[in-house]
Amino acid sequence: CEPEREEATMAEKGLPTPGYPGLLRMVARISGNLSCSKPPPPQNEESIIKNLDDCDDALIVLLNERAKAIEQLWSVRGPEEGIPSAALSAPTLERLRKTNEMVNGPLPDSAIRGIFQEVSKVCARLRHSVAYLGPPATFSHQAARSRFGVNSCYEQCDRISDIFYHVEKGTTDYGVAPVENSTEGAISQTLDLLANSDDVIEVVAEVCLDIQHNLLSRADISRIQRVYSHPQALAQCRQWLQTHVPGATINSEASTARAAQIASEALPEEGIAAVSSTLASELYDIPIRAAGIQDLTSNMTRFVVIRKNNPENPEQISTTPTGDDKTMLVLSTADRVGALHDVLNTLQQQSINLSRIESRPCRSKAWEYIFFVDLHGHRKEPHIAAALETLKSHCSHIRVLGSFPFVRTAQAIKTA
């Protein structure tokens, strides 16, 4: 094997050459029984450094070839539900172990496993990225992880509006935003952003989490003077806080995780606490002084998974019916008597069940309202499509936000 001659031939054919000479030299060495299974012959420092450079070049070539193969595999398999975990399968780990045993090099199996796990994580990030309301350990973060897996590429955002911004600009493929809590109702900011996103944003899935709030603090409960958390979390624990820390001042923060950060940085004598999650307690290393402090034991939050529509075909529907689906609409009725009745009557005539209807003020005109409607069924189903077509005559504006599988039970939050 003559790497320099091969490099010249590749250049003549217009093939990429960076990195390939090093790969060819490494192949030559290994095929010449100069692999790491045998002690290397004596070399000077310059030749050793050259050998290291060739190794690095070869790795770059092979890592990119692996990434291309992963993308080809995704193309063959087609779309999947969410993002599979980047964790290596048991057969893959066993194959790597056997190969490493045959090579008989200085790297232990644990090192090889760790290296390939990191490679797998990086390759998984080529497929999708996800924006969520940060910092890490918020319930939005946990909702995103429950849907897309712990090894996906996550972009933390300071505000819900930032989630929509990242998805609209294409800097992330997906966004996960809270839309409704079973105790406190709708998250108005998310609804407003959905209503004003025109045809740019599509809702492609929902996640429902069973939320448990905890009181985190370095101080004993009897010495707590200030409590921090997100307004929704504080509202969901209002009665417990009034009963158990009646003298404490209540302070709103951007997220439950940010509140946990504040409490973790405080000294015990400062008496600062946070209402946050078990994961936040572990991540920020702060004790749980009281667990499950939400006022209602059944405390669930629903999140929507959003994605940017295809700009070349905004009417393209990215999901397919499963037989148990939900369709989200936003609409405004004509300014006449009985307009909302006509909307509901249209759905009733098609035997369509509503799971939710909620009004929000119309931002473009004072004292007028828009309606968010969740109905059972997929927009591709004939009776849903017929109802949507009829609704156009009863509404001054109607838009389908998305159709996706109906999530009927909340997922328990995992802290690992």
Image (cartoon, helix red, strand yellow):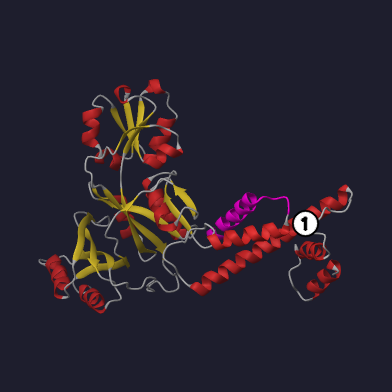
User: Where is residue 336 drawn, in percent x and y?
Assistant: 13, 66
User: Where is residue 382 drawn, in percent x and y?
Assistant: 25, 79
Determine whether, in the image, residue 101 is placed left or right of residue 315: right
The secondary structure making up most of the magenta span is helix
Q: Which residues are magenta?
A: 105-125
Of residue 338 and residue 60, the one placed in the foreground of this image is 60
Determine whether, in the image, residue 398 is placed left or right of residue 95: left
Local SS, label 1: loop
Q: Which quadrant of the structure image shows residue 263?
A: top left
Question: Label 1: how many residues lie within 10 Å, few (<14), some (14-19) or many (20+)?
Answer: few
Q: Which quadrant of the structure image shows residue 324?
A: bottom left
Q: Residue shown at 38%/49% (left/top)?
A: 140
From this viewpoint, which residue is outermost toward the left? 337
Determine whether, in the image, residue 125 is placed left or right of residue 346: right
Q: Residue shown at 22%/60% (left/top)?
A: 371
Mark 1 = which residue?
Answer: 37
Q: Residue shown at 41%/65% (left/top)?
A: 81
From this viewpoint, which residue is outermost toward the top? 269
Residue 151 lies within the magenta run: no
